[in-house]
Image: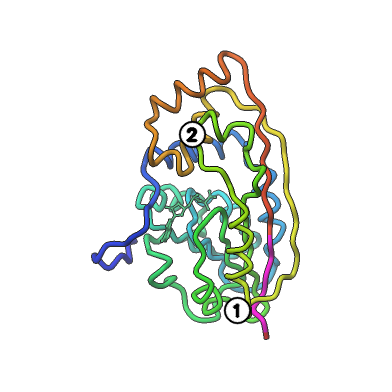
Amino acid sequence: MSLLSGKGTAHRSDTAEMVAARVAVFDAGLYEPVVSAVADSVPDGPGTVVDAAAGTGAYLSAALRGDRVGVAVDLSKSCARVAARCHPRVVSVVADLWSQIPVADGSAGAVLSVFAPRNAAETARILAPGGRWVIVTPNPGHLAEIVEPMGMLRVGDAKARRLAADLDGAFDIVSTRRVTAVRELTAERLADVAGMGPAGFHRSRTELESAAGDLAGDASVIATLDVTLTVARRAV
Ligand SMILES: C[S@@+](CC[C@H](N)C(=O)[O-])C[C@H]1O[C@@H](n2cnc3c(N)ncnc32)[C@H](O)[C@@H]1O
């Protein structure tokens, strides 16, 4: 289902090639420690779980326990197609987070923002009383071993400042946790990890595979996941 207005958006949605790379990364379990940490941070209880910029829906499907229902929201049609199949109780919607999250006021038990743009005002509007905002942001050390050789974007300190600004006033932090894990990547997975992120917008698959081959050869390289998981609730 698409809720785009037709006016277009200034934001870039992930391409089909980037989504295929993301599917391969999650299928290989490379982000499993982050997926589990997100799922564990979603409190049991009533209310929809909304994944705002859901990508393939990997985090959302892992977070749905009992008979809970999920809504996957993403600007990318390719993402929405994959997310629609991620779980039988997930509804997948193409929508721009900067317009409106297509969910009723106070109806979300949890909102997920994982490596994603954040609309704090909309999140505050849809969260139910007692609901949680589960946010994952990369730390400067995230995938640091492969950032430069693969032409990926370096994570700066601004991410933490931006998160503080988003939460300021409207949200209280419930918990903060760092999740790190060392992963071993073959050349193919290396191209996928790079290609599923912003590098996928400016480097072709052939370029990424060539860089990955130079780095990993027939063996593998080590890359460290390093993220912060923040859980927040609406300030009263
Ligand atoms: C880095 S990916 C993260 C996806 C997913 N949360 C994950 O970690 O696997 C960022 C996602 O944000 C989506 N996106 C970017 N701008 C958006 C917007 N304005 N509204 C909705 N989704 C957006 C992209 O299409 C992409 O799926």
Pointer 2 residue: 151
Instruction: Name the kind of residue labelled 1 in the image.
Output: Ala
- Looking at this view, is 90 or 204 the one in front? 204
Instruction: Specify the farthest residue to the front.
Output: 157
Q: In percent of the image, x 53 and y 65: which residue is there?
A: 50
49 horizontally vs 10: left or right: right
Q: Position of residue 236 (x, y in %)?
A: 68, 86
Per the rendered image, the range of residues in magenta is 230-235
The answer to which quarter of the image holds residue 33 is: top right
The answer to which quarter of the image holds residue 147 is: top right
Q: Where 129 sits versus 56, above or below?
A: below
Pointer 1 residue: 128
Instruction: Name the kind of residue labelled 2 in the image.
Output: Gly
Rendered-image quadrant of the N terminus: bottom left
Near mark 2 (Cα within 10 A), the count class, few <14, some 14-19 or many ≥20, is: some
215 horizontally vs 40: left or right: left
Q: Where 225 sits versus 89, above or below?
A: above
> Which label is found at residue 52?
none
Q: In percent of the image, x 62 and y 56: which residue is there?
A: 136
For label 2, the SS is loop
Q: Where 202 sits versus 46, above or below?
A: above
**Nearest-to-viewer mark from 2 and 1:** 2
Q: Position of residue 155 (x, y in %)?
A: 58, 47
Instruction: Specify the farthest residue to the left.
Output: 6
Colour approach in the figure: rainbow
78 horizontally vs 8: left or right: right
- Looking at this view, is 197 or 79 the one in front? 197
Q: In percent of the image, x 56 and y 69: which residue is there?
A: 48
Q: Position of residue 123 (x, y in %)?
A: 53, 73
